Image: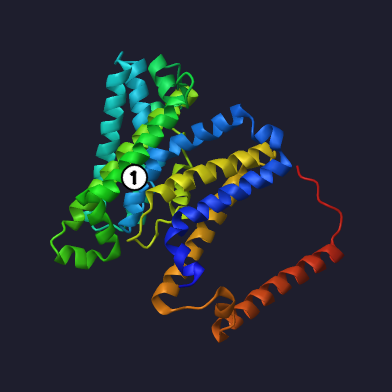
Amino acid sequence: MKLSDRIEPFLAIIGPMVMILAILLFMGIAEPARYFRLSNLNLILLDAALYMPMAMAMTFVITQRGIDLSIGSVAALSSIIMAFLIKQYGFSAPVAIAIALLLGAVFGLINGLVITKFKVPDLIGTLAMDLVYRGFALVIAKGLVLARFPEIMTDIGRGQIPGFIPLPVVIGLFTMVLGYWLLKKTYFGRYTVAIGSNPEAAEMTGIAVDRYKIYAYVLMGASAALAGVMLTGKLNAIQATSAPYFNLHVIAAVVVGGTSLFGGRASMLGSLAGVLLLSMMINALVTLRIEFFWQSVASGVVIVSSVALYTWLQKKDRDGAKGLLAGLKTPESLRLLRLSGGLIAALALLLLIGTLLAGNPVASG
């Protein structure tokens, strides 16, 4: 057996770990003093902890061939309602937090029902519900920023256990351990993989496919609400426009961790590694003083690269495909390469012509 065949089953964890090592090596050369400060490592852990609950739940959703694009809005709406209960109605913080988590589960239940009972595709259904939840949050908040919450809230968001890691990291790691147990030791985990591998076959064997899909979305909604509570505590404030990029970040972490977007393959350890990788990558960009908007570019590149890699590996297993270079030598690939080269050459030519014929810049205003 070749070495590549031996390590392939472990790529889910090896892939992100290699990228983490690459970031550490690069930052060790570029900015060792700032990046490896204890305070900065603490920031990386705090950022990663925020996404761990959602990555755990998203692993189940994606493994079932689903997707949830509404998690940012679920987090914002649950937290806005929690904040109003505390600030305007005098609810105790623990009760308001419990209500927020239950509301998140209800929103997840609604997503699951829209997808399974109304037969709306996951992508469209959760995108539409994202608009609904965000709209409700904007209506309720009316542009207000709610701030200054009880100490228990800030402890959940950024509290530090003396002589130990931050409390949010403990919460995040606990959710990942819970997710690992659910995936490996329960019917829910086994049925999740079966549904993602072949939904029709799973239904024929007696698995209640729709019910277990709803379970996954309920878990996703509750986890998003927990992340919203943690975000509120971390910032000690919340507004209706909070958490706009939760979905992109979480999906990127889960996919780079080896969970297949085509279903049937899950890796909870890989999802944890993916969360750490993205938090380290974004922190590295900030440390290097690179503009915020490049963070979205980096996340998008990570998603595309990871999906392309794992798709090629699946095709290799199924069809006996050869190396990447061999795939580029097929007639169809050569035609596409010629098309790409032609488009790039045309763009370069137009830029050259524009440069040669350029006049004085027109002043605005």
Question: x, y (%) of residue 189?
Answer: 26, 51
Q: Which residue is at the front of the view, 37 or 256?
A: 37
Location of the C terminus (image quadrant): top right
Residue at (51%, 56%) from the top-left corner? 15
Q: Where 219 sits versus 34, above or below?
A: below
Q: Is residue 14 left or right of residue 343?
A: left
Q: Is residue 72 visible?
A: yes
Question: x, y (%) of residue 61?
Answer: 32, 51
Determine the residue located farthest toward the front in the rendered image: 1
Residue at (39%, 75%) from the top-left corner? 318
Q: Amino acid at mark 1?
A: Ala
Residue designated by label 1: 57
Q: Is residue 140 left or right of residue 313?
A: left
Question: x, y (%) of residue 55?
Answer: 40, 44
Q: Where 357 sits versus 241, above or below?
A: below
Q: Is residue 330 left or right of residue 175?
A: right
Q: For residue 282, what is the image quadrant?
A: top right
Q: Which residue is at the front of the view, 92 or 202?
A: 202
